[in-house]
Amino acid sequence: MELVVQEDNKIKNEKIDLENLMKFVNSKLESNKNSEYEAQILYYNLNYTVPEIKLFLKYYDISYRKMKKENMIQCLVLFEMNKDNESIVSMRKQMWFYLKELQSDSFFKQFVLIN
């Protein structure tokens, strides 16, 4: 495969090694996944308490016994980043949103109990 590259008004023909290009693209994709993973861990660590994280894990039927907060968050993020779990993750987030809405309402908050 040949590519025409324009640099400083000069046109060059360069051959591109597809294998190296694919390795480069894959490494960038992997780097983005790692960044997303780290960002999600930071997000849960800063914004949620241990009891809330336990509720998420319980919803996904993931055991959290004898785990520290950081390990629970890692399990949670790995589960949620898995494409096979998209529907249940979406449902959990939607339900959590509804729960927060009910808790913020002056009338309905009396009916919402979280263990």
Image (cartoon, rainbow, N blue to C red):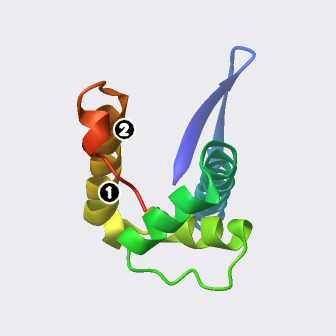
Residue 1 x/y as whole percent: 51, 55
Taking the image as shown, residue 17 lies to the left or right of residue 87, namely: right
Q: Which mark is residue 65?
A: none
* Mark 2 nearby-residue class (10 Å; few <14, some 14–19, many ≥20): few
- The kind of secondary structure element at disc 2 is helix
- The residue at the point 63 percent across, 31 percent down is 5
Residue 93 visible: yes
The tag earlier along the polypeptide, 2 or 1, is 1
Return the residue found at the far top. 9
Taking the image as shown, residue 74 lies to the left or right of residue 100, namely: right
Asked whether 43 or 34 is in front, the reply is: 43
Residue 17 visible: no
Q: Amino acid at mark 2?
A: Lys
Quadrant of the image containing the C terminus:
bottom left
| Number of the front mark, 2 or 1 | 2
Read off the residue under disc 2. Answer: 100
Q: Which mark is residue 92?
A: 1
Q: Is residue 34 above or below residue 78?
A: above
Return the residue found at the far front. 110
Asked whether 108 or 74 is in front, the reply is: 108
- The residue at the point 54 percent across, 48 percent down is 2
Residue 113 x/y as whole percent: 35, 52
Q: Amino acid at mark 1?
A: Arg
* Mark 1 nearby-residue class (10 Å; few <14, some 14–19, many ≥20): some
- The residue at the point 30 percent across, 54 percent down is 90
- The residue at the point 25 percent across, 62 percent down is 87
Residue 82 x/y as whole percent: 43, 69
